[in-house]
Image: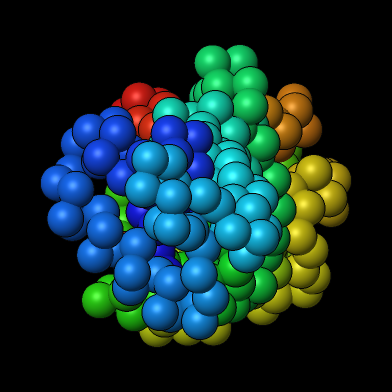
Amino acid sequence: MTIDDCYNFITLYQTRSVSDAAVALNISQSALSKRLRSLQDELGVALISTRNKRQLTITESGEVFFRYAQTITAQVQLLQNDLLDYQDLRRGTLHIGSVPVMAQYGLAEKMRHFMQDFPQINLRLEELEGANLLAKLQKQELDLGILRDVQSQQLNQTQFDTVTLTSDELQVVLPADHPLAQLPAIEMRDLQNIDVVSLNPGSGVYEKMATRYQQAGFTPNIRFTTPHIETLLAMIAHTTQVTFLFAKSAAPFMTSDVVLRPFATPMVSHLQLVYPRGTRSQATTKFLQYLTDAAD
């Protein structure tokens, strides 16, 4: 039995004529009769009686089938309407995971504009540390993720698509009264005997910093780690310690107590949007357009 069988029988029930039903359904009378016989054989009951040659009669089984056919076709129509809503962005939910940088890179503003333009699409945002974000992406528990390239590179590139949203430069953050604050740019050798505080492993900053020290041939003396930028800056104020942050993400937290200085050899990182390949919905596609409009 197919959904067409239900539609066919409803029309037959309403017209009480195979020939009239065939015309209404735009199929041949013989094709309709064949489908009706097949349906009755499949169900094992007679749905109609043709004893009266002038008018087709609906059996008691036919009356029962008609009621169910009405319910089935109504539910199918509701399903089609609901699916159309999702296709036309009138309904849906996007589950997004991001490292906590939405405001610093203007992405929160883009999300707000998206929500204003598509009020029926709900956004569920989880701000996560890198390792947790990667785990959720790998389990396909997120529609998309926003993370740094050092993190996205750990994903299977055959299973995910990646779009670069913006770039940022890793810089040294120093107390304003630190001796190195007088320099226009910092060499790694300048930091060899300087204590460090840092964002946690998995932040992207930690991994970039570790790479820079490894390239310089010595190990940083990391005294303190935290997931919060404002805590880092409070920890280094009026000390001889330093930290490392991406310039754009640090900007909103900067005070007169600290200064940013670039490395003599710049280290650039890309903030990227990642989503599982082959699973992109209409809502995801439109959301991508809004975020990539923010790219610079």
- State whether residue 177 is above or below residue 274: above
Which image quarter: residue 112? top right
Looking at the image, can residue 104 be seen?
A: no
- State whether residue 229 is above or below residue 225: above
Residue at image x 16%, y 55%?
Answer: 30
Residue at image x 77%, y 74%?
Answer: 223
Residue at image x 25%, y 76%?
Answer: 158
Towards the viewer: 208 or 277: 277
Q: Position of residue 208 (x, y in %)?
A: 46, 66
Q: Position of residue 22 (x, y in %)?
A: 25, 41
Looking at the image, can residue 124 be seen?
A: yes
Q: Position of residue 108 (x, y in %)?
A: 61, 29
Q: Position of residue 10 (x, y in %)?
A: 48, 44
Q: Looking at the rendering, in which quadrant would you find the N terminus? A: bottom left
Q: Looking at the rendering, in which quadrant would you find the C terminus? A: top left
- State whether residue 186 is above or below residue 105: below
Towards the viewer: 259 or 144: 144
Specify whether 183 is left or right of 268. right
